[in-house]
Amino acid sequence: MSEKTGAYGNKASEGSFRRKFDVEAASAKAKEQDKAAYEHAKSAEQAAAKGKKAPRQKSDLPKPTQALQARTQDLEIEKNLGKTIVVNQSAGGKGPGFYVSLTAAS
């Protein structure tokens, strides 16, 4: 009979389904980031000594986003003109539609 394996290829009886933390890779990445921060601080200090602004790091630059791109296709709003569409209300309703709470008239 074959041994059962988990979703990540580990033995099912082993129980170690979580990803292991790689200390060596993390320390190498931290050293690289420290070196980059040191170089940036050094160039900023040199620029300040000359009376100029510090150069910008690549991480300081704004990141492009999808929200700023223009639409390329038509929304086709006119195709639903004059139609009634029921929309599901997922936040605390009895179902789709409109509800009016009736109170006793005094």
Image (spheres, grey):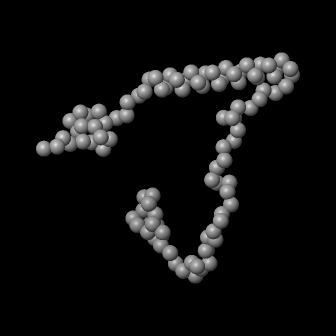
Query: Is 12 or 98 nearer to us in this picture?
Result: 12
Return the x and y of residue 105 as percentages of the image width and height. 46, 69
Inspect this view and state whether residue 78 appears. yes
Q: Is residue 6 left or right of residue 97?
A: left
Inspect this view and state whether residue 105 appears. no
Q: Is residue 35 left or right of residue 106?
A: right
Residue that protrudes farthest toward the bottom in the picture:
82
Return the x and y of residue 34 as percentages of the image width and height. 61, 21
Asked if 28 appears above or below 65 in the picture, the reply is above
Image quadrant in which you'd find residue 94: bottom left
Asked if 50 appears above or below 83 in the picture, the reply is above
Residue, x 61% and y 74% (percent of image)?
76
Asked if 99 appears above or below 63 in the picture, the reply is below
Q: Is residue 68 left or right of residue 87?
A: right
Image quadrant in which you'd find residue 61: top right
Residue, x 28% and y 37% (percent of image)?
10
Query: Is 106 or 1 nearer to us in this picture?
Result: 1
The quarter of the rendered structure image containing the N terminus is: top left
Residue that protrudes farthest toward the right in the picture:
51
Return the x and y of residue 9 as percentages of the image width and height. 29, 40
Return the x and y of residue 90 as percentages of the image width and height. 44, 60
Residue that protrudes farthest toward the left in the picture:
1
